[in-house]
Image: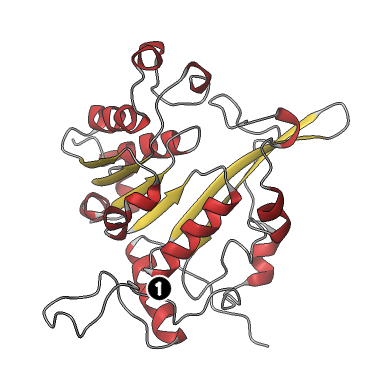
Amino acid sequence: MSRLDRQSFLGADSDRTLNELTVGYVGLGGGGSHVAQQAAHLGIGGHVLVDGDIVEDTNLNRLVSGTAKDAKDKRLKVDVAARTIKAVNPSARVKMCPVPWQQALEELKGCDVIIGGLDSVVAKDDLDRFCRRHLIPYIDMGMDVHDTGGAYLIAGQVVLSSPGCPCLRCFGVVTEDGLAQEAKRYGAAGSRPQVVWPNGNKNTVRSSPRVAMLGDRPCPHTSALETGDVRFDIRGDSKRKPSSPVAADGAAAQGATRRLLRKLGIFLRPAPET
């Protein structure tokens, strides 16, 4: 009996499929460290860890597997995440990038999906655009605490953005007002509320009405033609291939994204007829 036998309901070939996937994590704090740990338990084989920060005492209420000794030794967050993944799956393929994500573009281009745990609205917007250019599904996550008048409501969101489909701007995660203000504090909990212990006051997960409203409509904020490496010039080297597919039109971009999502077991609803 293998350690993944109890999730055989995912499919007879799920072990191989999960092992072949490579997931990129941009930000390994309160959200990213959780996801990296869970992905290791799930059986994901490839992990690209991107975060230039070190562990500090103030991280220890939200950094999975982070210890007081890590903070004392000023260990990198990518080191802690790699240690967690390897402890679960010693054969995992782990690439550590202790740099800002803009300096790890080549590593991120090789990912099947990228998961962002970024605080900055500007950074979310930039990473979303990078992923869409290279036809990589991007999952953004975050949480907040709201004062409801004497009580507090813990809530968060997980948003899938992919080429040809609604982006973070469509979902309202990135707004012009948010970009302008770039708030340094979040909700009623103050700065950086995503900690280990909260699971939400209502303990529920539900689909946002905005998802149903947007359906499968193409994103109006980015062109489907904005795909492929902008530095690639076919005239320079006839043997060189683009680092990602280059869509000739919107239909091609959507087709490439759907094929990749199917590989991940994600199936998009058909767009409602108008």
Q: Residue at x 33, y 14 (%)?
A: 73
For the view shown, which residue lies furthest in the left direction? 239
Kindly identify the amino acid type of the residue bearing the numbered disc 1.
Arg
The N terminus lies in which quarter of the figure?
A: top left
Q: Residue 124 location in percent, x, y?
A: 53, 53
The residue pinned by badge 1 equals 258
Q: Quadrant of residue 197?
A: top right
- Element type at mark 1: helix
Q: Residue 135 location in percent, x, y?
A: 38, 69
Q: Horizontally, is 11 left or right of 222 in the view?
A: left
Q: Say above or below: 97 vs 210.
A: above
Residue 44 at least partly seen: no
> Looking at the image, which is closer to me, 120 or 68?
120
Q: Residue at x 69, y 70 (%)?
A: 213
Q: Horizontally, is 84 left or right of 64 in the view?
A: left
Assess disc 1: are there few (<14), some (14-19) or many (≥20) residues with their C-alpha within 10 Å of its C-alpha. Answer: many
